Image: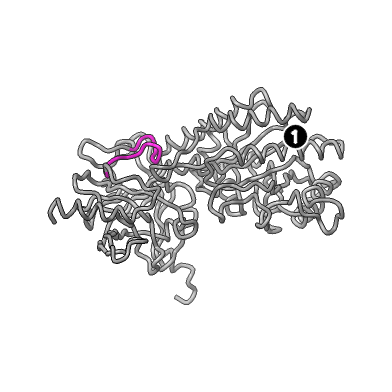
Amino acid sequence: MTDTTSAVQQMAGAELAPAWLPAAGDVNELVPAMWAHDVERGPNGEVTISGIPVSELKAQFGTPLFVMSEDDFRARARTFKTAFDQAFKDICGGVDVYYAGKAFLSTEVARWVDSEGLRLDTCSGGELAVAKRAGLSGANLGLHGNNKSSAEINRALDMGLGRIVVDSLHELARVADIAGARGVKANVMLRLTPGVHAHTHESIATAHEDQKFGLSFIAEDPEAPGMSAAEAAAKLAVESASINFLGFHAHIGSQIFEAEGFEIAARKLLAFTNEIQNKYSITLPELDLGGGYGIAYTAVDTPRPAAEVAEAMAAVVRETCAQLGMSCPRLSIEPGRAIVGSTTFTLYETGTLKTVQVEVDGQEDVTAPRRYVSVDGGMSDNARPVLYDADYSAVVANRSSIATPALSRVVGKHCESGDIVVRDVYLPNDVAAGDLLAVPGTGAYCWALASNYNYVPRPPVVAVKNGTARLIVRGETEDDLLARDLGA
């Protein structure tokens, strides 16, 4: 292929590129916001993390492989804790930061969270089991979930959890009954739906009325005429002898960049807290404003620094409390993706490649090339593109290239046309079978959502620190997959 032909194809391929994708540029560039701070290209152009070349990681651990920077994780955790403590020091003495374990959790990560002064938010009995094995104190744990089983509620009480976040009147009654039968008090927060429209994908927006989470400010409870579901739950929590009513909780969604949604939710929750305190002559000691802070998956994403988010939220809380004439409860937040997302990249090996001609929208009889680059993983280790239309980026990691950029689609090995890892990215047109591709920003909700579709084993997770890589989650084997098959 001549340089002229390559340039023509590149220009034609650009016709297929989505509006958000930057024009083809340096395909070797590592955009800092998308990577852990200790990821860079070495002198020979190979991507390294904490000085370790990706080819060494491939040789030692294989691919696909989740590669996580421990130092970067710890630094992001400290940044959130420090920023929110400083911003809220004069308002409520600081902020309790709960790492949202559903983003990614292992015993090692749970210990990092604990050692950096954060608490841990869990969503199931399994996540509580991880926290227990890691040696975390129950007082520093929270339990979420819209349909907690009796076993999970009992485990939370056994462990002395600092909070159980309750989603409905029915669940509140169950928690009260189980705690009462045991002769203990359950520490409870009530999750509310503040009716805030978060600018994010529908499946990860969680504060509007028509979804499964939370108690409504608006809808009247059938069993409590004249009361919203939120107030009816608050009344029950106040009156129950087996409930230690801590306060309210809200979470408006995930991967959010705009501040307005958080600010509106904070105002609504503070106003409702003040109303309930006055009506029932109580003081609610805590208020949780959730998480959902976005990260950079592509070069056009612009996440806000933690300090900026903290200061904006503190200004709203300070002003609202002054207007209402109320003391501010102890605040808590729940970042998950914002701490772990950019700490990790997934390393793949490329396999088959092909170029197809695709019709260009709105241009009759005009086609443009799109290159398909297949890798040895896919939707079994990253389901987010098919679930949420999530965008990612990718680079050739084992070398640099001066070849012409080509609009490419990185796809997996699974028997599904929707098995897309990166929908649109410019890669050098000399990418070949055996090259290593690195996809940044895969720390959150990738391994956690991983499956065994097509009987593909889930990949290992490696933590890197000070030039040393170690397994923190081993990869599955075919023996693991067959171990539960009782017909074997």
Magenta range is 27-39
In percent of width and height, residue 66 lies at 39, 49
Q: Residue at x 74, y 43 (%)?
A: 187
Query: Residue beneath label 1, please?
Result: 285
For the point 20% across and 53% down, which residue is it? 8
Residue 158 visible in the shown view: no
Residue type pointed to by label 1: Pro
Q: Nearer the viewer, residue 241 or 234?
A: 234
- Name the magenta segment's main secondary structure: loop
Mark 1 crowdedness (10 Å alpha carbons): few <14, some 14-19, many ≥20? some
Q: Quadrant of the C terminus?
A: bottom left
From the viewer's perspective, is 217 left or right of 434? right
102 part of magenta stretch: no
> Furthest-left residue in view?
2
Q: Is 367 drawn above or below residue 466 in the view shown?
A: below
Q: Is residue 4 above or below residue 77?
A: below
